[in-house]
Structure formats: structure tokens, C-alpha cells
Amino acid sequence: MTKVMAIANQKGGVGKTTTTVNLAASLAAANRRVLLIDLDPQGNATMGSGIDKRDLEITVYHVLLGKKSIFEALMKSEVGKYDVLPANRDLAGAEIELVEFTERETRLRDALALVVNEYDYVLIDCPPALNLLTLNGLCAAKSVMIPMQCEYYALEGLSDLINTIRRVRASLNPVLEIEGLLRTMFDPRNTLAQQVSDQLQAHFGNKVYRTAIPRNVRLAEAPSHGLPVMHHDKSSKGTQAYLALASELMGVEENPVTA
Ligand code: ATP
Ligand code: MG
């Protein structure tokens, strides 16, 4: 059974794209068949996978609007060893153009159905908004991974996201569940971060991944080289953390990074 996961949080800059790219590469390194779907007009996951968004003629935009088939749009991250349904700024127009369509929230799910069985994991990088693109991600997915920074306002934003997930489950996608909460840019020596992390665990229990992603400069550098971090610096803490997260997801925990 393919695991289709949306990586979502309407808060910007929390590590959604970093998580999508590096988890895709880590799962591919474990010989899993992975598709990364970039649902953000910023195209950061596309660039971070080593695909130049400026050169693209066919993207997820054309697939959502039914102008091209998903087969025509799929690309390969040569270095990451996973497939990519890429995005660029064309996608910014989709929101308005999709309004004419009925069933506009399930366009991605319908397109994905043609290829989903080819993969073990499909990871969908959502934009920082609870908009129609994110709704398409949530309708296509079976679960949601929520990356978050352990800061004061993090919990407030979480309730809006959880309400949206509930609404989608009630109306459009009854199987949708929260896959897990991922602590990103985490520093256990920071007292506030530790307090927020404790609150998260008290509230969400084992929905909080044991693996936490530390703040690591290699993770921030890697996208400028168009590389997942494991192909930029194999021994970095960022590489180890995302490999541990992949292991946790696959249910084999050789080196869990706990915090
Ligand atoms: P957006 O909401 O704009 O899509 P995002 O949630 O996808 O943002 P990222 O783009 O993954 O977030 O990360 C935001 C910034 O923080 C980027 O510059 C990224 O390189 C950096 N970053 C992400 N995770 C880490 C980390 N663990 N350590 C250091 N830097 C990180
Ligand atoms: Mg992003």
C-alpha cells in the first residue's frame, strides 16, 4: 500500500520543504520508490531536488488544470533518486483558474491515481497557506505530517490546521489522519523549545515523532547546491536526523535520534 503524505503547516518557514526533500532522499536511499510532489509556486522543493524550475515547460500546474497528463509532467531527481512532479510560479495562477472547475479540491487526487501504485511513498510539499492548493494536497493524501518549530505561537497555529484537517475529513477525504508532528530546527538546550516540546508530547502523545530535527547549517546550505543534505554532507547532523526520521516512518529504528 502506498503511503501518501502531505507535509503541511500554514505557518511559513517551519521546515516543510526541507523535510519533504530530505525525507524523499532518505527513503530513496533505503530503496523505497518515492514521488515528491511540489505544490508550492515557490518551487523550492523542485530546486532542492536539483531541477531548475525556470526551465520547466510542464509542471503540476498543467496537471491540476488538465492541460497535460501526470505522465508528461513527471521528472527525476537524478541525485536524489526519486521522481518529482515539479512546480514553479505558473502554479500561482491555478487557484483562480481552478474556480471554474467542479470538484476543484480533488484534481491532484484524480491525477495521482494514475501512477500512485508505482510508489511506496508519495510526499506532497504544501505551500504556507490553507488555500486550494493545500486542500488538493490534503485530499490526495492519506495522512499529514506537520513540521513545526517549538516556539511560543506554534501551538496556536496548530489548532487552525487541525480544524482544517477535520473539515477535509468530514467532507472530502474521510481517511485523512494526522501522521505525526515533527519538531524542526530543534534545540533541546533552549528552555522554551523544551517546554513547548513537553506540551506537544502531553497533548499529542505518540503522534510526536521521536526523531527531532536539529538546527543544522548543512540543511540550510544544501538547497543552494540543488542537493538533498545527504548528498551535500553525508556525516552532518541534518543527514543523520532525516535518515532517522525515515527509519522511524518505515518502522525500523536502528539509530533513533531522540530529544
Ligand atoms: P515555506 O513556508 O516558505 O514553504 P518551509 O516551511 O517549506 O517554508 P523551509 O523552506 O524548509 O520551510 O525552511 C525555511 C528556512 O529554514 C530555509 O532557509 C531552510 O534552509 C532553513 N531550515 C529548515 N530546516 C532547518 C534546520 N533544521 N536547520 C537549519 N536551517 C533549516
Ligand atoms: Mg516550503
Image (spheres, rainbow, N blue to C red):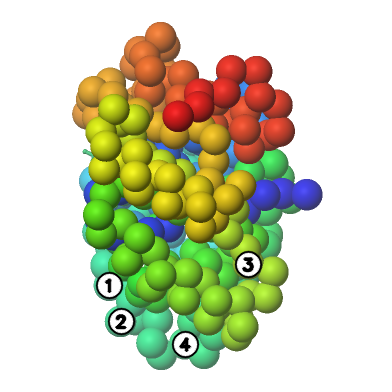
Label 1, on which residue? 93
Residue 111 rendering spot, x and y as whole percentages: 59, 65
Q: Secondary structure at mark 2?
A: helix
Q: What residue sits 42% from the left and 11% below the top?
A: 234
Distance of label 3 from label 4 (alpha carbons): 23 Å
Q: Secondary structure at mark 3?
A: loop
For marks 3 and 4, give the one nearer the viewer. 3
For the residue pair 34 and 23, the one nearer the viewer reads as 23
Quadrant into which the C terminus falls: top left
- The answer to whether residue 232 is seen in the rendering is yes
Label 4, on which residue? 101
Relative to 232, is 224 on the left or the right?
A: left
| Badge 3 vs badge 4, beta-carbon distance below 8 Å | no
Please give the label number shown on residue 176: 3
Q: Secondary structure at mark 1?
A: helix
Distance of label 1 from label 2 (alpha carbons): 6 Å
Badge 2: few (under 14), some or many (20 or more) residues near its Cα, within 10 Å?
A: few
Badge 1: few (under 14), some or many (20 or more) residues near its Cα, within 10 Å?
A: few
Label 2, on which residue? 96
Which three-letter amino acid code belongs to the residue tagged 4? Phe
Residue 210 rendering spot, x and y as whole percentages: 54, 35
Earlier sequence position, callout 3 versus callout 2:
2
For marks 1 and 3, give the one nearer the viewer. 3
- The image quarter containing residue 89 is bottom left
Relative to 51, is 170 on the left or the right?
A: right
Which three-letter amino acid code belongs to the residue tagged 1? Gly
Residue 178 rendering spot, x and y as whole percentages: 58, 59
